[in-house]
């Protein structure tokens, strides 16, 4: 990659119509506006009549995972790294709050199903968790685990079984209640520093064109019902999954291990 390519990308993408300036902390709004205007004018970025672009259109799209259901990389690492995942939901999907609750209960903390089954009860992995990310037209849902070379198949078996169980039966009302409480707590704690507040405001303005208040955000989480969680789990976790394994796995056979659909 050359400097010319990087500079060309910068000139095309970093333009006033695509930028959001987000600031948080003990500040004076008018003073910040003056500083930003001065900086943009000195860089020649306020010339012309640029109009802010609307957030990228968000349309749910389900991509196929059939071309790459399995990828194994034999590498001399201390432990094997496993990712089992599938297509999630887009960021405009109203079910994203229910998916967040489901993710919290399944693999979002030390009291989650995966952590308790894989690490606490069986001691098969030091790190195991699930995660979800949303984008304009689709998303990702996955489970990561790091374990010893000889434990990969055991870990995959337990993770696959838990995913299948949650897809078929959902999670209990008590798990939903605990997950909602933990999710709300972590959301508030995550906004204690100004950098996190700045990032939340900027991202919301950039991708949604609107900024939910913290109270509204907590209300969205609190309004999630067990039925909504079970519905999104049945949809997402039943989709075809891809498996990636990196580590000192040699010629172990992973065909069909954990890849469902």
Image (cartoon, rainbow, N blue to C red):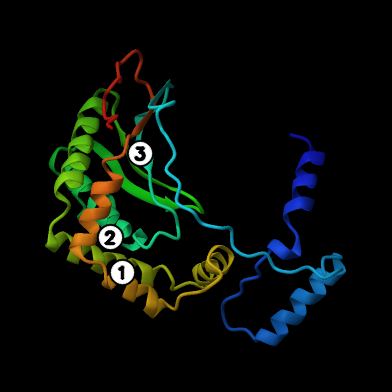
The image quarter in which residue 105 lies = bottom left
Q: Could you tell me which secondary element the residue under label 2 belongs to?
A: helix
Q: Which disc, if any, is residue 101?
A: 2
Q: Is residue 118 visible?
A: no
Q: Which residue is mark 3?
A: 85
Q: How many marks?
A: 3
* Rendered position, 164 above or below 17: above
Q: Could you tell me which quadrant the N terminus lies in?
A: top right
Residue visible at 17% across and 37% down in the picture: 161
The image quarter in which residue 102 lies = bottom left
Residue visible at 27% across and 43% down in the picture: 237
Q: Could you tell me which secondary element the residue under label 3 belongs to?
A: strand
Closer to the chain start, of discs 1 and 2, is 2
Q: Which residue is mark 1?
A: 221
Q: Is residue 248 visible?
A: yes
Q: Are the residues flagged by discs 1 and 3 in contact, CB closer than 8 Å? A: no
Percent of width and height locating residue 143: 32, 42
Q: Is residue 94 left or right of residue 206?
A: left
Percent of width and height locating residue 20: 65, 67
Closer to the chain start, of discs 1 and 3, is 3
* Label 3 Cα neighbours within 10 Å, binned few <14 / some 14-19 / many ≥20: many
């Amino acid at each position: 990659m050359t400097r010319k390519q990087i500079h060309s990308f910068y000139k095309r993408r970093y333009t006033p119509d695509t930028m959001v300036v987000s600031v948080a902390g003990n500040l004076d709004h008018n003073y910040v506006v003056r500083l930003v205007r001065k900086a943009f004018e000195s860089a020649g970025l306020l010339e012309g009549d640029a109009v802010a672009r609307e957030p990228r259109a968000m349309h749910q799209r389900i991509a196929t995972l059939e071309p790459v259901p399995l990828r194994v990389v034999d590498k001399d690492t201390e432990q094997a790294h496993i990712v089992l995942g599938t297509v999630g939901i887009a960021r405009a999907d109203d079910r994203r709050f229910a998916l967040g609750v489901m993710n919290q209960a399944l693999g979002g903390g030390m009291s989650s199903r995966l952590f308790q089954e894989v690490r606490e009860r069986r001691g098969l992995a030091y790190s195991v968790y699930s995660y979800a990310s949303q984008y304009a037209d689709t998303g990702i849902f996955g489970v990561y685990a790091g374990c010893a070379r000889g434990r990969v198949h055991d870990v995959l078996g337990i993770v696959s079984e838990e995913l299948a169980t949650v897809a078929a039966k959902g999670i209990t009302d008590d798990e939903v209640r605990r997950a909602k409480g933990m999710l709300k707590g972590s959301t508030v704690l995550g906004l204690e520093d100004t950098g996190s507040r700045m990032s939340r405001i900027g991202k919301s303005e950039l991708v949604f064109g609107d900024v939910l208040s913290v109270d509204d955000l907590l209300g969205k989480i609190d309004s999630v019902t067990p039925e909504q969680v079970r519905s999104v789990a049945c949809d997402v976790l039943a989709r075809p999954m891809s498996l990636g394994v990196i580590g000192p796995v040699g010629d172990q056979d992973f065909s069909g291990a954990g890849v469902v659909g």
